Image (cartoon, grey):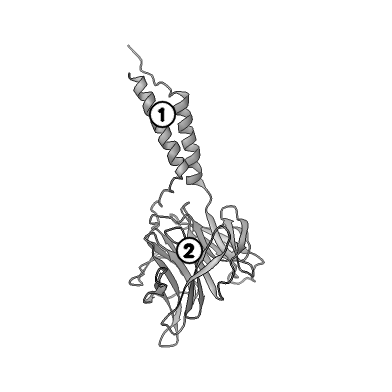
Amino acid sequence: MSRSHIQAPPPAAAAALISTLVLLAPAVNADPIGYALGGRGPELYRIDLATVEVEQIGPTGPIGEGRVRLTFHADGTLYGLVGSGVSLRLVAFDPATGTGQVVAEFALDLPSFELYGFAGVADGGLWAAGLTEDAQGGYHGVILAIDPAGGTAGEPVVIQGGGPFEFGLAACGNQLLLLRAGLFAIDPVTGERTELFAASPPAEGVDVGPDGGLWTVYTGPLPGTFPPPHGRVYRMDLATGEIVQVGGTGVFHGLAISPPVAGACIAGTPLAVPTLSPLALVVLAISLVVAARWVRRRHA
């Protein structure tokens, strides 16, 4: 009776495959990298969210007064939306130097507007969310599209349901997520929201990372506490809803994570697999060619 055996691949093929795995590992397991604004300048900072290590990039230059929220556009541009009353300014930042350039200015046809959220979806759309007054003197949330090319804002849509004044907006693929005393999927066309989890982390900046987490930075006081000397970083697992305070950091506003997640992130479903770097694709192609040649020689 003959025995079959598996012959090990030649050293060249094995080395190529190992090199491919080494290059792929950082793409899958890399810590999410966030960009946020801080300081009096203000200045742009780079934050390794998993380790809470902070790197100062540089001053933004004049971008105007007002609350700022950050997001990455699908084309890779880091945008900031600066809100001061009903006046909004769209700013493009250079992640390498921190410099910001105002690319559009426009006014909203609303009695008032307080900016709280800004997010970019995979199809290239940008969305802003905030509070405005209603006819009865109360306040309600609205969401509206921002056109970076035309420098205009779309018609505001009322966000259904109430909640606290402060909230956040994030995107995962073409899905928009609303943080407002819970985590919701929100339809920006109708304003309808669907609850995903009953709790959400506090947020002055929020975005979704390729690790399957929703990350926030927060510097305000928690209920029943005094303002902390430093800000905090939180992570919410989008599969389980678990919220963890990762660590303390500086006082930051806005948060945009690179690279943006391309796939939908409905709770309980897997997120998009991170894209491979060009170098990883080259090594993968070489390894496949080497393996194919070895197979042909083996059966010649």
Callout in the foreground (2, 1): 1
Quadrant of the drawing holding the C terminus: top left
Residue 181 appears in view: no
Residue occupied by mark 1: 290
Q: Secondary structure at mark 2?
A: strand
Q: Secondary structure at mark 1?
A: helix
Q: Residue furthest bottom?
A: 136
Dot 1, crowdedness within 10 Å: few (<14), some or many (≥20)?
A: some
Residue at the image position 50 percent from the left and 38 percent from the top: 22
Q: Quadrant of residue 155?
A: bottom left
Tell me how far mark 2 sits from mark 1, CA to CA. Answer: 42 Å
Instruction: For the residues labelled 2 and 1, say whether their Cβ atoms are less than 8 Å apart.
Output: no
Q: In the image, what residue type sits under mark 2?
A: Thr
Residue occupied by mark 2: 71
Residue at the image position 47 percent from the left and 24 percent from the top: 11
Q: Earlier in the sequence, mark 2 or mark 1?
A: 2
Left or right: residue 29 versus residue 7 is: right
Give residue 61's position: percent from left, percent from top: 59, 69
